[in-house]
């Protein structure tokens, strides 16, 4: 059986619309905190996509990554009542990526920005942003500067 082809990671580039931040936790703990934060906000994890497993099916290899899709029907109801064109913004998504240097990077949703682009949905964006903020805060490196501190929380 041939060895999978390793995917080479390009450099991180400045100026991304949604720059990732470095998690103060390891990969598994980052995912645990995202799941716990989603549950604490009374939101539902809709699906977790495992890109590592997907690329393996095509004989490629990559470091760990997960895409956590989440939302709740009560917000879908508000969204569709206000502006059905905004359905493209749901569900929200966190992306967790393990970098070659072992650091863990998180791409967080920006619902305030995303929903504000749709007439009638700025308030919903602010509400969803307020639910996402504590999850991001629980992961930000400046809040948990070491893996030891992260495990103790």
Image (spheres, helix red, strand yellow):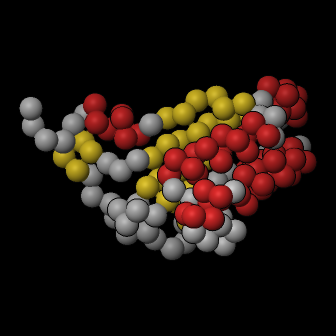
> From the image, which quarter does the C terminus lie in?
bottom right
Q: Is residue 43 left or right of residue 21?
A: right
Q: Is residue 28 left or right of residue 102?
A: right
* Residue at (46% x, 71% y) in the render: 13
Q: What percent of the width, then of the height, locates residue 73? A: 79, 25
Q: What percent of the width, then of the height, locates residue 93? A: 62, 43
Query: In front: 149, or 123?
Result: 149
Q: What percent of the width, then of the height, locates residue 88? A: 66, 37
* Residue at (77% x, 30% y) in the render: 72
Residue 121 visible in the current orientation: no
Q: Is residue 126 left or right of residue 38?
A: right
Q: Quick check: 18 above or below 126?
A: below
> From the image, which quarter does the N terminus lie in?
top left
Query: In front: 108, or 98?
Result: 98
Which residue ends up furthest to the left in the rendered image? 1
Which of the 4 quarters of the picture holds residue 108? bottom right
Q: What percent of the width, then of the height, locates residue 34? A: 65, 46
* Residue at (66% x, 32% y) in the render: 45
Q: Quick check: 51 above or below 106?
A: above
* Residue at (85% x, 28% y) in the render: 74
Residue 114 visible in the current orientation: yes
């Amino acid at each position: 059986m041939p060895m999978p082809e390793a995917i080479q990671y390009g450099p991180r580039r400045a100026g991304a619309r949604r720059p990732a931040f470095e998690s103060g936790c390891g990969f598994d703990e980052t995912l645990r905190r995202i799941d716990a934060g989603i549950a604490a906000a009374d939101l539902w994890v809709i699906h977790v996509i495992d890109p590592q497993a997907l690329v393996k099916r095509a004989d490629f290899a990559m470091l760990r990554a997960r895409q956590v899709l989440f939302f709740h029907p009560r917000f879908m109801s508000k969204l569709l009542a206000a502006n059905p064109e905004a359905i493209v913004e749901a569900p929200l998504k966190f992306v967790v990526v393990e970098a070659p240097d072992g650091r863990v990077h998180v791409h967080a949703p920006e619902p305030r920005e995303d929903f504000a682009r749709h007439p009638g949905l700025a308030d919903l964006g602010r509400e969803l942003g307020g639910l996402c903020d504590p999850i991001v805060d629980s992961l930000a490196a400046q809040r948990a500067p070491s893996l030891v501190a992260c495990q103790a929380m």
